[in-house]
């Protein structure tokens, strides 16, 4: 896709829809980056954990999880930012849009292709358009053929069968606890984004095939 057209679409996005409602605004220093959508800031000697509103980044053990965290760290790590609080999530974290150098960080992460627009909780049209631009241009995680949204990844982790402790060292491991991509013979564990998510494959045991380079099989 023509880069000039991509940049034009990004600029147009900035004036389309109104920002979310903010209940509080303050300055704070970023002292930690947990992953691509969660940071810790220090305000008046108080640590506040913040979940970036509007986006959902890959989990740390997903593909692009490390790159997403690194991208967010490059943007805000150790810097003073503006925190525009929109609410609190069910885990007690502050939900907020973060601004640095007059730029919205959630928007920047989408532009870099390092996060998804979290459509279930955000109806922000600007963020939706930024995701579309990155996706069409195959920027960041969108360069991968089969990208798994983090909310689906978390859902699979919750429903994945938990390993049962063996009562005897001679017992045979349960067949069907892993997924074998029969195209390349690669084995994925139940926490892998490719578990039951390849064009061809079947359930297998923990010793079949070769281990996945990302999840370790």
Image: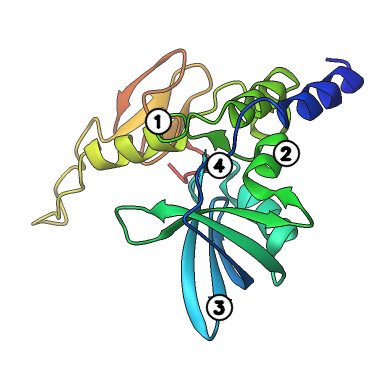
Which of discs 3 and 2 lies nearer the camera? The answer is 3
Is residue 190 visible in the rendered structure shown here?
Answer: no
Q: Residue at x 45, y 18 (%)?
A: 182
Secondary structure beneath dot 1 equals: loop
Q: CA distance from mark 3 to mark 2?
A: 28 Å
Q: CA distance from mark 3 to mark 1?
A: 30 Å
Residue that carries the numbered disc 4 in the rendered image: 213
Dividing the picture into quarters, in which one does residue 84 lie?
bottom right
Which numbered marker is on residue 43? Answer: 3
Q: CA distance from mark 4 to mark 3?
A: 41 Å
Question: Is the image coloured rainbow, by chain, by secondary structure, or in one colour?
Answer: rainbow
The mark nearer the N terminus, 2 or 4, is 2
Q: Position of residue 185 (x, y in %)?
A: 48, 25
Which of discs 1 and 2 lies nearer the camera? The answer is 1
The mark nearer the N terminus, 1 or 4, is 1
Residue that carries the numbered disc 1 in the rendered image: 120
Secondary structure beneath dot 4 equals: loop
């Amino acid at each position: 896709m023509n880069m000039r057209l991509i940049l034009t679409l990004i600029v147009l996005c900035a004036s389309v829809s109104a920002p979310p409602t903010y209940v509080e605004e303050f300055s704070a220093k970023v002292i930690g980056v947990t992953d691509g959508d969660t940071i810790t800031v220090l305000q008046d000697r108080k640590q506040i954990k913040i979940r970036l509103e509007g986006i959902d980044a890959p989990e740390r053990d997903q593909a692009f999880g490390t790159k997403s965290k690194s991208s967010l760290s490059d943007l805000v790590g150790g810097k003073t930012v503006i925190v525009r609080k929109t609410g609190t999530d069910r885990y007690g974290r502050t939900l907020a849009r973060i601004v640095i150098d007059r730029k919205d960080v959630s928007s920047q992460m989408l532009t870099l292709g390092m996060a998804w627009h979290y459509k279930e909780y955000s109806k922000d049209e600007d963020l939706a358009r930024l995701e579309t631009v990155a996706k069409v241009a195959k920027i960041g995680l969108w360069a991968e053929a089969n990208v798994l949204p983090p909310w689906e990844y978390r859902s699979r982790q919750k429903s994945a069968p938990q390993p049962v402790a063996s009562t005897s060292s001679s017992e045979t491991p349960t067949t069907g606890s892993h997924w074998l991509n029969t195209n390349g013979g690669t084995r994925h564990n139940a926490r892998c984004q490719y578990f039951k998510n390849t064009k061809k494959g079947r359930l297998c045991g923990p010793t079949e095939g070769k281990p996945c380079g990302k999840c370790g099989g």
